[in-house]
Amino acid sequence: MLKDLDAALSDRVADAYEAYFDLLRFIARRRFRIPAPDIQPLIHDVFVSFMRHEKVIGDDRRWLIAAISNACRNYWRNLKPGQQLDEELLDPRTPVDDVLARHDVSLLFARLPAACRSILRLRYVEGLNAREIAAHYGTSPGYIRLKVHRCLAAARRALGERP
Amino acid sequence: MSEHPDHTTLAKYIEGGPVADRLAIAAHLADCAGCRNELDALEATFRLHDNVLDFIESRRSDRGRPQEQFDILATRQRMGAEAARAESFFGELMRLPIEEWPSAFAQNPHQRTEGMVLRLLAEVEIEVKRRPQHALLLINVAEIVTGSLDIPAIHVCAGDCWKQRANALRHLGRYAESLEAADLAAAFYRLLSLGDFDIGQALYTRAVTLFKMTHYDEALSVIQSARELLREFGDTMPLAKTLILEACIRFEQGDIEWAERTWIEVVPMLQRFDDRIELARVRANLAECSLKRGRPASALAQAQAAATGFAELAMDAERIRSEWMVAAILRALGEHDRALELLYAAAASFRALGMTSDAGFVNLDITEELLRRNEWSEAANIARELAGLFTAAGVTLASVTALSYLRTAVEGEQATPALVRYVRDYVAADDPARTFSAPS
C-alpha cells in the first residue's frame, strides 16, 4: 500500500501540487486579492479540473496559472454580479506576466546571499539609486555600484543553476 | 448460500476475517451481480480509507503541511476508486442491450457517479464517428447518470454530454441541432468557477460544425474566440486542434500563407503530445500548401513524411492519398516516370480497398499523364475503366455521360490533358442539375 501511495505521490498531479501550490496561492492572494479563507477552495477546484484535463495539458505551470486566474476573475464576478471588473483583472496576460515575474524574482532572491537580496531589492524593487542606497548603508556610492554588479553576477549564476 | 450476505459479512470477507462459509459466499458472488457491486463498492471504500490512513501516517512528521494537500489527495483517490468501479460496472452494462442500461442504473444507484459519466463519454468518443446514432444513445444514458450528481460535477458533466451530442449530431449531418448542442455545452461550462478551458472547447465544437456547413466566415470568427480562450492555458491538445481547424478554414478561404504558418506552429505541439495521426495529417496539409505556393521540393518532403507517418500507423487510405500527392508533386518537378509508377500503385491500392471513386480519380490523373506522352492505346484502356469505377462509386448519370465522352475522345485520339481536367472537375462536382456539355 505504501509503495502504491509513494507512486501516487510522485505522479504528475502531486508533483504539480508540490511545485505550484505556493505560486497559485500567491496569485490568488496578491494579484487578485482573494480573501484568505476562499483561496483554498479555489485552488482545490483548479487541481480537480487539472486532474480531469491532465492528458491534454502540455505545460502544467502555464495551465495552472491560467486556471487560477480564471477562477479568481469568476470569483469576483460571482460575488459582485453586474459590476464591471477592473481592467487590470480582466486582461489575462498582464497579471499573469506580472505575477510570474515577481514570483520568479522572489525565487531568485531566495537563492542569493542576504546582503545581495537586500541591496538588489533596494535597487530594483524600491527603485533607489546608488547614492540613496549608500546613504542607507553609510557607505560610498562607488562601493554600492560594485556590490550591485557582483550581486547581479551572482543572480546570473543562480539563474543558470537549477533551484 | 441462497440469501444475500449483509455488509458486515462482505466486509469480513474482504478483510479475510472469520465468516461462516467463505466458499458459499464466493459461489454466491459469482452468480449475483448485485452483491458483486456491493463488494466492489466496499473494496473501493476500503482502499480509499487505507490510502488516506497511510497518507496521514506518512505525514505525521509534517504537521505544518497545508490542509489542501490532504483534500487533493482524497479527491484524487475518490476519482480513482470511482473510475475503477465505473470500469467494472461498464463491463456488466456491455452485456445488456443499451435500452436496459437506464434500469440497470435505477437498480444500482451507487453507480451513478461522475466517474461513470466519464466512462460512458469515453465510449462515446470511440463510437461517435463510426456509429453516431449509437453514440447518441450512450450520451442519453450519461445524461441520466449526470442528473444524480451534485454541483459542480453536474455542470461539468452536462457540458460534456452536450459537447459530445454536438459531435454526434454533426456526424449525422444534423447541423442545426449540433450548433444548438454546442451552445448548450458552453452554457453549462459558463456555470463553472473556472470554465474558460471547457468553453474554448465548446466553441471549437461549434466551429467544426460551421466548417462542415462551409460557413467559413462564421467558423473563423468562432474559432478565433476559442483560440483566444485556450491560448492563455499554454500548449494543450484543444489549442492544437483549434489551430489546425483555423488553418483548414484559412486554406478553404484561399489564405494559403496564413494556413501554412498556423500548421507549422502546431507541429511542435503535436510532437510534444505524440499525436502521430494529427501530425501526419498536418504534414499532408503542409505539402499541399508548399505545392500551391510553388515550392514542390519542400512539398515532396512533407508529403513523403506524411505517407511514412500514415504507413507506420497502418492507415492505408490516408497513406495511399499521401502517395498520390507525392505523385502529383513529382509531376510538378518533371519526374514523370516515377510519378506514373506511383499513380498506378495508388489506383491498384484504392481498388483493393474498395475505394472505387478514389481509384477513378487517380485513373484520371494517369490518363492525363499518358496523353501528355501521346501513349494513346494505354490511355484508352484506362479511360474505358473510368465509367465502371465511378458507377460503382454511385456517381450521377450526368457524370457517367461525361466519362463516356472522355473515353470516346481518347479512343479517337482527340482528347487533351485540359479535357481530362475539365471532366475531372465535372465529376468531382457530380451535380445532377448540371447537364454535361463538351468544352468549347
Image: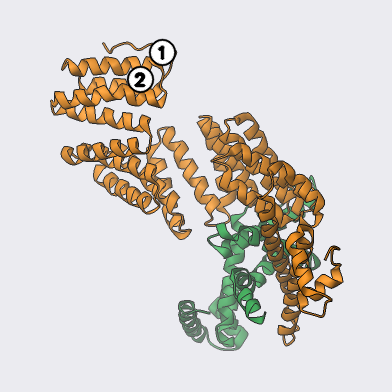
Chain colours: A green, B orange
Q: Mark 1 points at which residue?
A: B434
Picture coordinates of residue A145, whole percent (x, y): 49, 82
Element type at mark 2: helix
Residue closest to the eye, B349 or A138: B349
Q: Are marks 1 and 2 in contact (CB under 8 Å)?
A: yes
How busy is the neighbourhood of tag 2: few (under 14 within 10 Å), some, or many (20 plus)? some
- Residue depicted at x 23% and y 15%: B408
Residue closest to the eye, B84 or B269: B84
Amino acid type at image mark 1: Arg
Image quadrant of residue B407?
top left
Disc number placed over residue B426 in the picture, else none: 2
Q: Height in image: B31 above or below B303?
A: below
Mark toward the start of the polypeptide (1 vs 2): 2
Disc number placed over residue B282 in the picture, else none: none
Q: Does residue B41 appear anywhere in the picture?
A: no
Picture coordinates of residue B219, whole percent (x, y): 54, 35
Amino acid type at image mark 2: Tyr
